[in-house]
Image: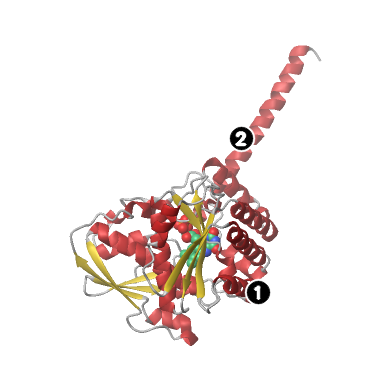
Amino acid sequence: MNQSRWKNSLNIIFLSIAGILAVVSIVVLMASGVFSRAQYVEPWQKSYSEKFDDPRIQLTAHALLAANGHNMQPWKIQLDADKNVFYLFADSERLVKEVDPFARQTMITQGTFLEYLRVAGDQLGYQTDITLFPNGEYDEQNLAASMKSKPVAKIALTKVEPQKNPLYEYMFLPDTNRAAYQKTPLTSEEVQQLLAINTDPDLTLTVFQEAADLEKLGAYALEGAKIESSVHRINEESAKIFRANEYDKNKYRYGFSVEGQGTTGIMKHIMQGLITLIPSMNNEESSANLYVNSTKTAVENTPAYALIISKDNSRIQQVKSGMLYSRLVLTAHSLGIVMQPPSQVLEEYSEMTEPYEKIHADYAPDGSTIQMFFRMGKHTKEFPPSMRRDVMDLILQ
Ligand SMILES: Cc1cc2nc3c(=O)[nH]c(=O)nc-3n(C[C@H](O)[C@H](O)[C@H](O)COP(=O)(O)O)c2cc1C
């Protein structure tokens, strides 16, 4: 073979490999839905609420950005005939029964929503008078039916002068950052500012930064992740709400996606495409490993933890804990601090009983209930927004 024929053959081989790679890349990116418009993040745009005339829908469009357990967004809104009144119901079709058997996280999630509603109300010029359980508390023996008939809150609006709420702009940032945080502890001013947010005598907020607490609470977070990822029925429940690609994210607009681990840009599409084409890549074992490893990295890079503890475990206290959590998230954002609640150890299913009891014996020995357990720190990496539903999907017709 002379030299030029040899070169030609090499060129053909090179071009063929490049061609195959190009085709594979296109197939992967198309499977991810690279050209789809991401409707599922539209509610994060500041102008999103302006599309609606009814102030109750405008406020709801803000509130649905709140942190919420498993990103289930279990909220239903009933507009009253009185145009200044509306009701929030917990959506009993959106419970995660394996991981949250008593719907405690679902109720905290009602509170996160209500606090966002309040902050948006200030900014838009509406005083929001919130009455919790205006028709009485749930019948716990018939919880799902009770959720349908009894509102969590009645919200009455009064038009007032718009007031610039300094927390407003932070509503448009994602509330949960699952990455490593900087090692720098929070300053005592920052801690004081965060602690001052709690004015409810039935709730206690404590921030922990001592080495012994970091070690103990980090160990609880890791143990919780290990136990949870080994429970098959919970893995199945989580897998059902995992949205593998842009098509699914636009279709459902709730649940989990690769953004939840901070993955963005071209890497997001490569991962989504591969998971869509080869679903076994995301099987129970590999997801469990990923989850435990990312929790390990998280706890090794956490300068502070905090607990919200309520005197009793009533539905009202659960909702109020969520309101406090949202206020904390927004204030933390204003201080450049991010948060993540590794809630597993607080979950009430049988496999978690031992660490649940231990963390309560350590940090809430008087019979009170730890409602929220979360990491705090300065971020090392910004997180992308997660899916949100169209506000009109929340409105009962
Ligand atoms: C009651 C409650 C429990 C949560 N538990 C966890 C958790 O165990 N691990 C976690 O990473 N995020 C947890 N989160 C955060 C949610 O997953 C998150 O708010 C949701 O996916 C939406 O994302 P965003 O907060 O970034 O908008 C929890 C949030 C709430 C309100």
**Count of numbered circles on the image:** 2
Where is residue 332 shown, x and y percent of the image? 42, 54
Which mark, by number, is residue 22?
2
> What crowding class fits label 1: few (fewer than 14 Cα within 10 Å), some (14-19), or many (20 or more)?
few
Q: Depth check: 9 or 69 in front? A: 69
Where is residue 69 shown, x and y percent of the image? 49, 65
Dots 1, 2 in contact, CB < 8 A: no
Q: Is residue 372 above or below residue 12?
A: below
Where is residue 323 shown, x and y percent of the image? 39, 67
Q: Nearer the viewer, mark 1 or mark 2?
A: 1
> What crowding class fits label 2: few (fewer than 14 Cα within 10 Å), some (14-19), or many (20 or more)?
few
Q: Assign a secondary structure to mark 1.
A: helix
Q: Earlier in the sequence, mark 1 or mark 2?
A: 2
Q: Tell me the quadrant of the picture where the C terminus can be found.
A: bottom left
Q: Where is mark 1, residue-wise? A: 354
Give the amino acid at mark 1: Glu
Question: Residue 157 vs residue 2: left or right?
Answer: left
Q: Could you tell me how far apart the alpha carbons at marks 1 and 2 are, in whole angstroms?
A: 52 Å
